[in-house]
Image (cartoon, helix red, strand yellow):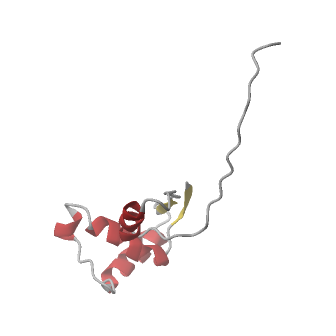
Amino acid sequence: MKFREANRNDIFAIFKLIAHDKLGKLREDFRDPLPEAYYTGFDNINEDKNQELIVLEDVLTTDKKRPDAQRFYERLGFQASHEGMKLQVKVYLSLNE
């Protein structure tokens, strides 16, 4: 996980998550493109030295053998970013000294 300061490029993804929440569906005006009021609000908060907007960049791993799980995560906005590699290593322990 990586924490960083939010920027204007994060606003759409942030409100996409909020709009999919039970309460967010009722109060947010989520559409593409977002209304300019969302960007104005972000700028106002961002300019206030007493405020700090932070986002969490999360890394998720899933198995290629789970296409339903991959589709689920893609619908949440996750994007495939790299190919994983595995090496099976066998460890033999000897209890005889």
* Residue at image location 60% in from the left, 67% down from the top: 82
Judged from this view, the residue extending furthest toward the top is 97
Percent x, y of residue 42: 40, 74
Quadrant in the rendering for residue 26: bottom left
Whether 65 is drawn above or below 7: the answer is above
Percent x, y of residue 10: 46, 73
* Residue at image location 48% in from the left, 78% down from the top: 9
Of 15 and 1, the residue lying toward us: 1
Quadrant in the rendering for residue 38: bottom left
Quarter that holds the C terminus: top right
Percent x, y of residue 89: 71, 42
Q: For this view, does 96 lie left or right of residue 44? A: right
Whether 95 is drawn above or below 45: the answer is above
Quarter that holds the N terminus: bottom right
The answer, for residue 81, to whether it is visible in the render is yes
The answer, for residue 52, to whether it is visible in the render is no
